[in-house]
Amino acid sequence: MFRYEVGAKILVRRRENPEHEPTQVEILAKAPNAIKVLVLSDGWFKRHEIRILTDEKWYSTNRMK
């Protein structure tokens, strides 16, 4: 489960590849086991894409300042 509120900018990692560089995202909306995000850094996705991340494939590491 993603513990941060809508509007928070956080770092997320893929569960199957945690050693990969974390992706910076901003939470746009939340559901019980997923978040809708705006991607803020290149990595798994292109910058400025909107994606749905599920908690079975992704986890949050910490809040960005």
Image (spheres, rainbow, N blue to C red):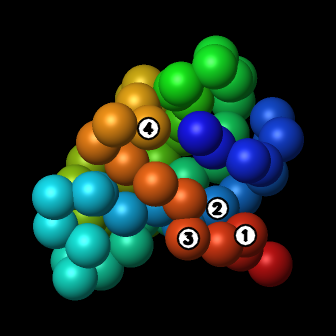
With 34 as the anchor, is 29 left or right in this view? right
- Secondary structure beneath dot 1 equals strand
Say if 26 sits above or below 43 in the image: above
With 24 as the anchor, is 13 left or right in this view? left
Quick one: label 2, few (<14), some, or many (20+) residues within 10 Å?
Answer: many
Q: Amino acid at mark 4?
A: Asp
Q: Amino acid at mark 1?
A: Arg
Q: Amino acid at mark 3?
A: Thr
What is the x, y in percent for residue 64? Answer: 71, 74
Query: Closer to the camera, 53 or 51?
Result: 53
Q: Earlier in the sequence, mark 2 or mark 1?
A: 2
Instruction: Write down the residue under mark 3.
Output: 61
Instruction: Write down the residue under mark 4.
Output: 55
Which mark is in front, 1 or 3? 3
| Dots 4, 2 in contact, CB < 8 A | no
Instruction: Write down the residue under mark 2.
Output: 10
Residue at 37%, 63% (x, y): give it.
13
| Dots 3, 2 in contact, CB < 8 A | yes
Q: Earlier in the sequence, mark 3 or mark 4?
A: 4
- State how far apart marks 2 and 1 are (Cα): 4 Å
Quick one: label 4, few (<14), some, or many (20+) residues within 10 Å?
Answer: some
Query: Is residue 9 visible in the rendered structure shown here?
Result: yes
Instruction: Write down the residue under mark 1.
Output: 63
What is the x, y in percent for residue 40? Answer: 51, 57
- Secondary structure beneath dot 4 equals loop
- State how far apart marks 4 and 2 are (Cα): 14 Å
